[in-house]
């Protein structure tokens, strides 16, 4: 995986994770990016607050995605192949990660803008679970633009979006 792709995945996780926790129709029952969570976590994890928040929202979002998509030979934004997960985690320990997460999850406008920017020209109108590509294409940046397009469509239209990759 390239550094650009890893950064993109981490920023998408932060933006989608933030938006998925928001509003009366929150998609997963967590509040890791809330002010109260930040106040609680910062004394416990002063140097890794962003990583702690992101790891928490990844766990909450992964559970919901797994329930909707299933588990096995499928992957999604919040559950990638082991090698990709390790690369993303390694990036989160770097100094650039906190800024990337903060820029993507500062507020709803920043998170929505992150999704819109990554989606670029991808026009998507598919709610619910949607197969994006084969698992072999996880390392393709264009594929992640399609993922961003699905989430952007879902949040704009107040509908669920669960883009995924499958091995078959």
Image (cartoon, helix red, strand yellow):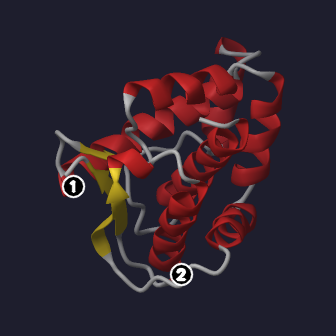
Residue found 44% across the figure and 68% down from its top:
24
In the picture shown, does residue 48 fall above or below 56?
above
Residue 59, percent across and down? Answer: 40, 35
Residue found 49% across the figure and 40% down from its top:
57
Checking the image for residue 49, the label placed there is none
Please tell me whether mark 1 sits on a helix, a strand or a loop.
helix
**Which corner quadrant of the image does residue 154 belong to?**
bottom left
Q: Is residue 58 visible?
A: yes
Residue placed under numbered mark 2 in the picture:
156
Q: Nearer the viewer, mark 2 or mark 1?
A: 1
Residue placed under numbered mark 1 in the picture:
69
Of residues 106 and 136, the one drawn nearer to the viewer in this rendering: 136
Please tell me whether mark 2 sits on a helix, a strand or a loop.
helix
Residue 129, percent across and down? Answer: 27, 67
Quadrant where the N terminus is found in the figure:
top right
Of residues 34 and 142, the one drawn nearer to the viewer in this rendering: 142
């Amino acid at each position: 995986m390239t550094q650009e792709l890893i950064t993109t995945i981490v920023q998408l996780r932060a933006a989608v994770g933030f938006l998925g926790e928001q509003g009366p129709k929150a998609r997963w029952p967590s509040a890791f990016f809330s002010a109260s969570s930040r106040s609680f976590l910062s004394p416990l994890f002063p140097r890794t607050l962003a990583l702690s928040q992101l790891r928490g929202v990844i766990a909450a979002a992964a559970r919901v995605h797994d329930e909707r998509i299933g588990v096995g030979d499928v992957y999604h934004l919040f559950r990638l192949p082991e090698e990709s997960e390790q690369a993303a985690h390694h990036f989160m320990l770097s100094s650039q990660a906190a800024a990337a997460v903060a820029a993507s999850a500062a507020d709803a406008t920043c998170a929505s803008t992150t999704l819109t920017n990554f989606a670029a020209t991808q026009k998507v109108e598919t709610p619910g679970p949607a197969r994006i590509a084969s698992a072999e294409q996880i390392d393709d940046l264009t594929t992640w633009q399609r993922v961003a397009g699905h989430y952007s469509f879902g949040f704009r239209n107040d509908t669920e979006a669960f883009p995924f990759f499958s091995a078959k």
